[in-house]
Amino acid sequence: MNGINPCRDNNARIKGGDVKSSNVLIVSVPPGEAPLWVREKWVGLELPLRYSAPKTCFCFGILSAPSTWWGLLWGMLRGRAERVSGYVVEAGPAVDILERSSPEAAAWWRENAPQHLAPKRCLVFNDFACRVVDA
């Protein structure tokens, strides 16, 4: 379930709160629920970070995430959320960057997970799949 995970910036259980000042380079295929060919397209992309350091988040899979705030809370209480250490990026701008190199992969995101691309929605890339670079 970990890998590219959805979170809502204002409702996410994120420890820390520094402002973004860096980018992250995706250096290996992140785990997650998106098809392998879609996840492979993230490799080599540089994405703007929401926070300059990795954060510990309670996350759900991109396809299995509950669609409501109450569902998220209930899922966390039932232990269905996974604690992930990773880099938080804003989802919409990240998919826009993905579209430049792979319109097909960006289309997959827009067709299969549009609810996660709304404003204030974020994706969490596992820290082992990333490297921080200067902005």
Image: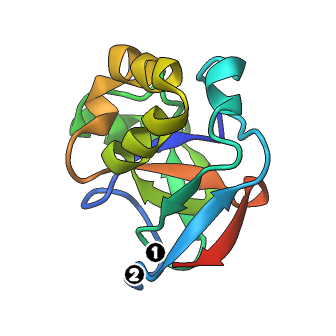
Give the image location of residue 86, x and y in percent: 62, 60
Image point 66% across, 60% down: which residue? 25
Determine the image quadrant of residue 32: top right
Compared with residue 61, is residue 110 higher up or lower down, i.e. above or below?
above
Three-letter code, disc 2: Gly
Q: Quadrant of the N terminus?
A: top right
Determine whether label 1 and label 2 are within 8 Å by CB.
yes
Depth check: give the residue in front, 13 or 3.
3
Determine the image quadrant of residue 74: top left
Give the image location of residue 23, x and y in percent: 54, 70
Label 1 neighbour load within 10 Å: few <14, some 14-19, many 20+:
some
Compared with residue 67, is residue 78 higher up or lower down, i.e. above or below?
below
Badge 1 marks a residue whose secondary structure is: loop
Image point 41% across, 39% down: which residue? 95
Please count the marks in the image. 2
Extreme residue toward the front, this view: 100
- Report the residue marked by disc 2: 17
The alpha-carbon separation of the residues under discs 1 and 2 comes to 7 Å
Extreme residue toward the left, this view: 119
Compared with residue 22, is residue 95 higher up or lower down, i.e. above or below?
above
- Report the residue marked by disc 1: 51
Image point 76% across, 39% down: which residue? 29
